[in-house]
């Protein structure tokens, strides 16, 4: 890409904060606001919007003195290279750090942020900010989003966002949503939303309370452009991280042999097929079994789930936004009982070579391979530790047998965790350091229902990545009546990708998601 040459005129490009914000009266009032001594009428005649709940945040409207400067700045930014950012937490495009970009208006903005604004913040907040400032440009388009997080990273103290957008409405999406918190300090629900406005600067302190997100962009023709980053400074104290209690693991129960044959495609119960699948699974550590349920049972249970209306929305938003079935219909309960039965534990043993049942044949062949790194598609994903990982403790009494290698391997200690879920736009799961389910060896099984002709760009895909990395090792698409099996080790984590508004006219789909432990 050809760089612009700076001439003497370019070197004279300069921009300052709106003089309204540099007056003594405003700075005195803002300082009171920041230090939590806010009066009801303070700064009511200023162009600023001050927010105290759910955490302290402000929007300085008409931020720069020369609004025309922003048009030229926007042109320069759009000529830069944008990198696609796409993982469990976000989907948007971003430039590299703007600290080294030698464009006249970018340089002028850098001088403003690193100089006048930083000095102003030190004065009004009383925080001794460092010279270090992170600064990049983000571009959000239709269906792009940044899900709930608190911005915590070593050294970050004050976050900023300068909006460079056309006329924007709430119907366009892309709002900066602020979350309140539950009794554990976890994000509960959006309690305030900030509308992007051109030439407005949003500021908030990075604290254990600063949970926020960029809601999905719903406009198909507007570009949400911003310059954003963080001022660095001394950190704030953080309470101990909340450890979420886990669903109790289930010991396999009994079902009659006739029940298995009434539900499961007999192809997967035949010795020859099981041996063939096991060979493939031992090589890849994953497989997808098409038409797993018999057609009549699949149709009946799909219809029962479509008509079911008792679903529990599960959070917190920095870990998941998913729906779990409650008071399930009898036919669905029958399928759940089957998936938690000794018979299915044995079938899974025969299909994978893992040891979920004492009668399993060829037990241990896959286990030997996966402990050498052959998990989640044979990727060897045992590299890397996620930032700040501390070995979260599990609350259930059966934690030790899942996490340790010295327990019995004859299938006698095998267990599973299972839930029935409904998937629609805005739902997702995230990777989280303190999630014990992301630090274990398990066989993941996902049986999707009513996911006819689903398209991956809509989300809902189960992605596997190495801990601490963004590169995808394996993705499993929702497919009707297909049982996906993936062996996951402690170095591999998984998430269900955010389902975007492109699916708003599609029927919801369901899955039965289980993890089986030897």
Image: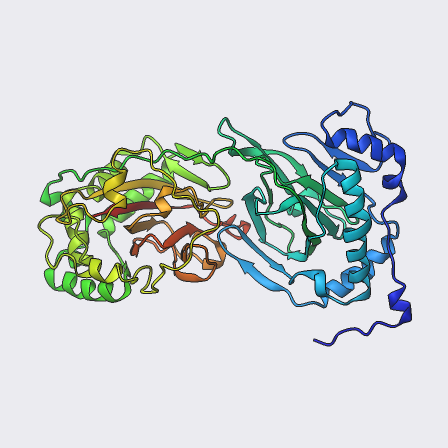
x and y percentages locating residue 103 in the rendered image = 78, 67
What percent of the width, then of the height, locates residue 424?
46, 45
Q: Residue at x 73, y 32 (%)?
A: 34
Q: Is residue 432 above or below residue 286?
A: above
**Residue sitting farthest toward the top:** 40
From the viewer's perspective, tell me whether residue 19 is left or right of residue 261: right
Report if residue 60 is visible in the image.
Answer: no
Q: Classify residue 401 as left or right of residue 152.
A: left
Is 327 on the left-hand or right-hand side of 106? Answer: left
Which quarter of the picture shows residue 475?
bottom left
**Camera-nearest residue between 408 and 414:** 408
Tell me residue 469's x, y (percent). Answer: 46, 58
Q: Nearer the viewer, residue 277 or 212?
A: 212
Q: In the image as oriented, which residue stretches furthest toward the bottom? A: 2
Please give the count of numbered marks on the rendered protein.
Answer: 0
- Above or below residue 399? Residue 142 is below
The vertical placement of 458 against 193, above or below, is below
Front-most of 231 and 306?
231
Describe residue 490's horizontal placement relative to residue 189 as left or right.
Answer: left
x, y percent for residue 201: 75, 45
């Amino acid at each position: 890409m050809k760089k612009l040459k700076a001439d003497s005129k370019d070197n004279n490009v300069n921009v300052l904060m709106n003089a309204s914000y540099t007056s003594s009266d405003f700075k005195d009032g803002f300082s009171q606001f920041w230090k939590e001594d806010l009066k009801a009428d303070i700064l009511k005649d200023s162009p600023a919007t001050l927010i105290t709940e759910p955490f302290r945040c402000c929007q300085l409207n008409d931020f720069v003195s020369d609004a025309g400067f922003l048009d030229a700045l926007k042109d320069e930014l759009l000529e830069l290279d944008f990198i696609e950012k796409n993982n469990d937490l976000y989907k948007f495009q971003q430039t590299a750090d703007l600290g080294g970009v030698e464009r006249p208006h970018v340089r002028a903005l850098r001088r403003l942020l690193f100089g006048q604004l930083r000095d102003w913040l030190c004065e009004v907040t009383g925080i001794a900010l460092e010279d270090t400032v992170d600064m990049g440009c983000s571009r959000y388009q239709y269906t792009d989003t940044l899900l709930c997080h608190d911005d915590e990273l070593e050294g970050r103290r004050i976050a900023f966002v300068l909006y460079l957008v056309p006329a924007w409405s709430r119907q366009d999406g892309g709002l900066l949503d602020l979350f309140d918190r539950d009794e554990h300090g976890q994000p509960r629900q959006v309690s305030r939303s900030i509308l992007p406005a051109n030439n407005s600067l949003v500021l908030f302190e990075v604290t254990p309370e600063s949970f926020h997100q960029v809601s999905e962009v719903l406009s198909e023709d507007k570009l949400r452009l911003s310059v954003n980053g963080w001022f660095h400074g001394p950190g704030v104290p953080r309470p101990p991280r909340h450890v979420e209690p886990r669903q109790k693991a289930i010991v396999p129960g009994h079902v009659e042999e006739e029940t298995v044959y009434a539900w499961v495609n007999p192809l997967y119960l035949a010795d020859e097929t099981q041996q063939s699948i096991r060979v493939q699974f031992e090589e890849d550590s994953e497989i997808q079994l098409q038409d797993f349920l018999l057609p009549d049972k699949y149709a009946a249970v799909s219809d029962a789930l479509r008509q079911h209306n008792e679903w529990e929305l599960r959070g917190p938003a920095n870990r998941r936004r998913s729906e779990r079935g409650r008071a399930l219909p009898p036919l669905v309960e029958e399928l759940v009982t089957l998936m938690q039965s000794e018979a299915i534990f044995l079938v899974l043993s025969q299909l994978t070579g893992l040891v979920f049942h004492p009668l399993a044949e060829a037990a241990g062949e896959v286990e030997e391979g996966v402990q050498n790194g052959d998990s989640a598609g044979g990727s060897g994903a045992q590299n890397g530790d996620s930032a700040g990982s501390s070995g979260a403790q599990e609350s259930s009494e059966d934690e030790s047998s899942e996490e340790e290698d010295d327990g019995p391997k004859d299938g006698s200690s095998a267990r599973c965790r299972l839930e029935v879920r409904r998937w629609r736009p805005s739902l997702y799961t995230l990777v989280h350091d303190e999630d014990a389910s992301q630090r274990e060896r398990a066989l993941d099984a996902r049986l999707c229902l009513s996911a006819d002709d689903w398209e991956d760009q809509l989300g809902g895909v189960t992605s596997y990545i190495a801990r601490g990395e963004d590169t995808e090792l394996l993705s499993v698409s929702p497919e009707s009546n297909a049982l996906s099996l993936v062996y996951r080790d402690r170095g591999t984590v998984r998430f269900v990708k955010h389902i975007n508004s492109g699916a708003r006219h599609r029927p919801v789909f369901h899955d039965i998601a289980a993890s089986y432990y030897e």
